[in-house]
Amino acid sequence: MDALRGIIDLLRGLRQQKARTATTLLGLGWGTFSVIVLLAFGTGLEEHMHEQAVAFGESIALVWPSRTTMNFAGLGCGRRVNIEREDVAALAAQIPELGRISPECIAWDQLQVGTKILRATISGVAPAYGALRTWRIEPGGRFLNERDIEDRRRVIVLGNRVRTGLFGRDPVLGRTVILQGLPFTVVGVLSPKRQDSDYSGQDADRICMPVTTHEQVYGDRLVSNFVFRARRADLHPRALRRVYEVLGRRCGFDPDDRQALYVWDRLEDERLRHYAFLGFEIMLAGSGILTMLVGGVGIGNLMFIRVRQRTHEIGIQMALGARPGRILRGVLAETFVLVAMGGLVGFFLSWSVTMVVRLTPAPETIGEPRISPAVTVLTTLLLGSVALLAGYFPARRAARLDPVRALVER
């Protein structure tokens, strides 16, 4: 009952300062809105980019043979490094830190179904490639398996745009595609996915066949590149170092020659992206916090005015036995109520904006803004801190009033 009476008294007092109260609450609400919306959009963008990165392949490294830049075993520099499928198999056998690995042989060729002809990227890969590159297959189909590799089967998995170009929306599993004059059976179709980058074309425009079949069709034993992932993220640096050591012995280059292989380290990209977004979010949160602090200064000024207007009333309370601690808590409680009002305005505006944005095409490119529990807790803690700072000094002044002098002031 005392709390309700205090809130009613606060609202009555604020009516005497309508303009100041409105601008102060709007300022605090805008600060809250800034913190929540900026972090919500930052969170949405980070999750969007992470989703695309995972669609390309999570925590993987892609390795291409390059040219040597160091002399080795009597051989000069500038030599082309050649890697065969057996060399990639040796990596899997000799490096226990590796989780999955797949060679990849790439060609560009035409596929034919009836009178339809389509040019696509042709990747000869191992079964592990599907998991490494996140090839999720549409229901009913499958990716390549070990039996396909052993028997050099003429089976292919189509990228979703290749499937549409050749078959439209017709069923494709079990259908035949002509490649290099040879019939290939479709065993799977890639589910549509968004990826943040690519090499040799998007996965939607790629087909995968057994690497052994690719060698048989195109007659090339050299791999274009290989893809691997360590068993754990902390083992990745050691696994990469061992890749240089094993291939250096087998392919004839100095293991310290980092230019002999071109490595696209996606795990390192993920780390850099994480730290970049962390700095971005700190910057966004900092700008919002500054705006919120400006609103807090307004709340503090408003509470000083409230204390000055209620000097006589506070003197009466002290004369009737109210302790300074009770006066201090009362002023602080009023401050928290004011800050909560401004914060609710900010929360409502933030929620409204994120809901509106979700209904637009914007999430396709910038992600879906999301007010996460962490953002909510952080904003609530910030509002509590602002309320404490804004209310403490007016409350301390009220608690230190001389009752006799307060009674005679009007």
Image (cartoon, rainbow, N blue to C red):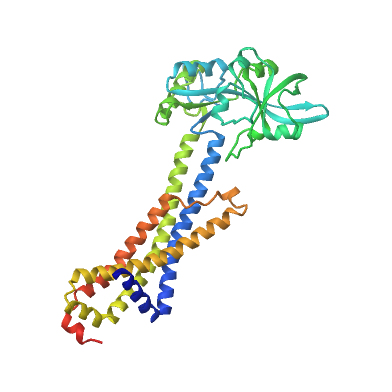
Which quarter shows the N terminus?
A: bottom left
Residue in the image at 40% along x and 26% along y: 238
Instruction: Measuring from the top left, give residue 87's x and y in whole percent.
Output: 53, 17
Quarter residue 331 falls in: bottom left
Relative to residue 102, is residue 9 drawn left or right?
left
Which quarter shows the C terminus?
A: bottom left
Q: Residue reaching furthest top?
A: 151
Instruction: Measuring from the top left, give residue 378's x and y in whole percent.
Output: 38, 54
Q: Residue reaching furthest right?
A: 115
Residue in the image at 58% along x and 50% along y: 363
Relative to residue 71, is residue 198 depicted above or below? below
Q: Nearer the viewer, residue 74 or 83?
A: 83
Q: Can the viewer see residue 223?
A: yes
Instruction: Measuring from the top left, give residue 167's x and y in whole percent.
Output: 76, 31
Q: Nearer the viewer, residue 264 or 44?
A: 44
Residue in the image at 44% along x and 52% along y: 281
Circle count = 0
Instruction: Measuring from the top left, give residue 364's x and y in whole percent.
Output: 60, 48
Relative to residue 296, is residue 195 drawn left or right?
right
Q: Can the viewer see residue 80?
A: no
Relative to residue 65, is residue 163 drawn left or right?
right
Relative to residue 189, is residue 360 depicted above or below? below
Relative to residue 190, is residue 51 depicted above or below? below
Quarter residue 215 falls in: top right
Q: Residue reaching furthest front?
A: 1
